[in-house]
Image (cartoon, helix red, strand yellow):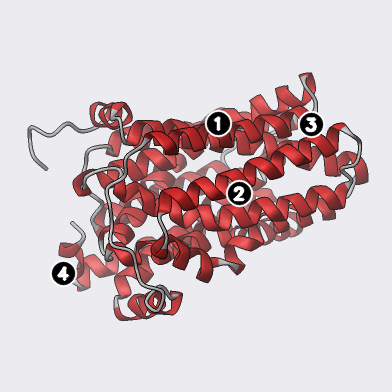
Amino acid sequence: MDAARPAGPRAAFGLIRSPTFGPYFVGNASSASGTWFQNLAAQLLVFRLTHSAFLLGVLNFANFIPVLALAPWAGSAADRFDRRRLLILTQALATILSAVLAVLAWSGLANQWVVIAFAFGLGISSAFSAPASTAFISQLVPRDELPSAVALNSMTFNIARAVGPALAALSVKKLGIPASFAINAGSYLLFIAALALVHPAPVQRARRGEARLRESLGLVRRTPRLLVFLLIVTAVGFASDPVNTEAPAFAHAFGYSDTVSGWIIGAFGVGAVAAAFFFAGRVAGSRRRMTTTLLLLGFGVVAFSVSPWLALGFVFLVVAGFGYLASNTHATSRLQLEVEESQRGRIMALWSVAFLGLRPVASLLDGTLAGAFGVRVAGVCLALPAFALAAVAAFYVAKRPQFATSAS
């Protein structure tokens, strides 16, 4: 890295102040925070109407299954069409859905199936926006700043995770469920305004015959390191799931009320935010760095799961959050840097499947293990993929020197 080039917090704040990436960062952070208002309000409404844990699972499934089912078309769209226009279209659709749901809830017409149907509609919007928004970052920053921008983009979701649930709970309590849906609609409008302000660099789009997901699957088969990056993203999602899904159960396991779950998720988010600032301005991770950060994630989750005291567990959560964001950022950055611009949307669609589309699987496995053997065992088991992928990364460093060099 150039000695004169800023790194760490200085580089991060420099990117946030930039007239191109800055508005996108703020708009995306607003939208990510608004999503917590939507999700919590939807969960509470469904549960108050039915008192059914099963329907809460159906709600979560409806929200995420479109990411998995629509990946071939979403990735192709991100490569064939103008990404900013595609993002504006998907955010406009999400705005309309959230606003209509708010009106229906105010009118008393939003029963559980209406809420689930709207969650499915918002999931369709997310399926198309996820690969487009991640690929769009490369048009907003120079190539050497892409890892920093990816880290900051990931940080927005972790900041939202840290503060969103608490603000959403306050909103539901003070303003009501319909108002929380309306707030989410407003957050999408802020993102649309941000997209209107930025000036992305032009890129060569893929032609219709080229923009097929199977072409990218072929690229992954021909380039094993891309598969490794996707597996790392999957492992990161699985290892972090116990913190996200079972936080109330962990609070009870430590002898506290379920309201402490917000502190558990927040401690994990603190570590993630620290990683985003630490790695800003630094080159994308080598295999050795990926090995280290995956070990930090796995160790942090396991140590938290078996910790006898919650105060000590918070320390391990910060370590886990640091490893989580660093590993995800390094893998996502390398995925973007090692493919042509015209293939980036489809590769990011595969990334969406790895990180978001498989989330219901991780949650189901997590819940099954927690129900059968206890939440602490579930936390240890879900961390194992992080250790496995750390071993894979270490193998490529030790046995495939050309692979390590390409990603250094």
- Mark 3 Cα within 10 Å, few/some/many (few <14, many 20+)? many
Foreground tag (1 vs 3): 3
For disc 1, the neighbor class at 10 Å (few under 14, some 14 to 19, many from 20) is: many
Frontmost of labels 2 and 1 is: 1
* First-in-chain label (3 vs 2): 3
Residue 162: mark in rendering: 1
Say what amino acid the circle numbered 1 marks: Ala
Tell me, for residue 401, which label it has, or none.
4
The disc label shown at residue 178, or none: 3
The residue tagged 2 is 242
| CA gap, disc 2 and disc 1 | 15 Å
The alpha-carbon separation of the residues under discs 4 and 3 comes to 56 Å
Q: Amino acid at mark 4?
A: Pro
Question: Of the residues under marks 2 and 1, which one precedes in the sequence?
Answer: 1
In primary-sequence order, the first of circles 4 and 3 is: 3
Alpha carbon of mark 3 to alpha carbon of mark 2: how far? Answer: 30 Å
Asked if the residue at tag 4 contacts the one at tag 2, i.e. Cβ–Cβ closer than 8 Å, the answer is no
Residue 43, percent from left and from top: 77, 42
Decide which of 392, 67 is in the foreground and name it. Answer: 67
Quarter holding the C terminus? bottom left
Instruction: Please state which amino acid type lies under the numbered disc 3.
Output: Pro
Q: Confirm or deny contact between disc 2 and disc 1 (CB under 8 A).
A: no
Crowd rating for badge 2 (residues with CA inside 10 Å; few <14, some 14–19, many 20+): many
Q: Quadrant of residue 291?
A: bottom left
